[in-house]
Amino acid sequence: MTIPKFLIGDHSAHEDAIFVIHTEFPRFIIDLTKDEIEWFEEFDKQDEAELATETENAIKEATAFYDAEIAKYKDG
């Protein structure tokens, strides 16, 4: 099975949340309504600088993915 790099998640207990799941390393879930990230990976203190850059890129990529997916529904 091939798993896409990003997936959109939904949960009835979090009706206002927009979850995007990143399935490749570093794996995480982001709630785009709050820009909150939950990482599935463990990071060392020495990884903090890279993590800051990775977080910024992750938010941009997840937002672009979500926007592109929603545009498909609007155009369809």
Image (cartoon, grey):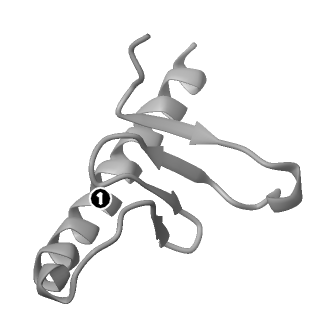
- The amino acid sitting under disc 1 is Ala
* Rendering quarter of residue 42: bottom left
x 27%, y 75%: residue? 43
**In front: 70, or 60?**
60
User: Residue 47: x percent and y percent?
Assistant: 15, 79
- Quarter of the picture holding the N terminus: top left
User: Residue 36: x percent and y percent?
Assistant: 51, 74
Q: Secondary structure at mark 1?
A: helix
**In front: 11, or 72?**
11
From the viewer's perspective, is 4 left or right of 43?
right
* Rendering quarter of residue 64: top left
Q: Would you name the residue on which mark 1 appears?
A: 58
x 87%, y 50%: residue? 12
**Residue occupying the far right of the picture:** 13
From the viewer's perspective, is 18 left or right of 35?
right
User: Residue 71: x percent and y percent?
Assistant: 49, 30
- Quarter of the picture holding the C terminus: top right
Above or below, 7 against 35 in this view is: above
Above or below, 37 against 68 in this view is: below
x 20%, y 89%: residue? 45
**In front: 34, or 6?**
6
User: Residue 27: x percent and y percent?
Assistant: 37, 52
Tag count in the figure?
Answer: 1
**Residue occupying the far bottom of the picture:** 45
Above or below, 15 against 9 in this view is: below
Q: Residues within 10 Å of mark 1 (few under 14, many from 20)?
A: many
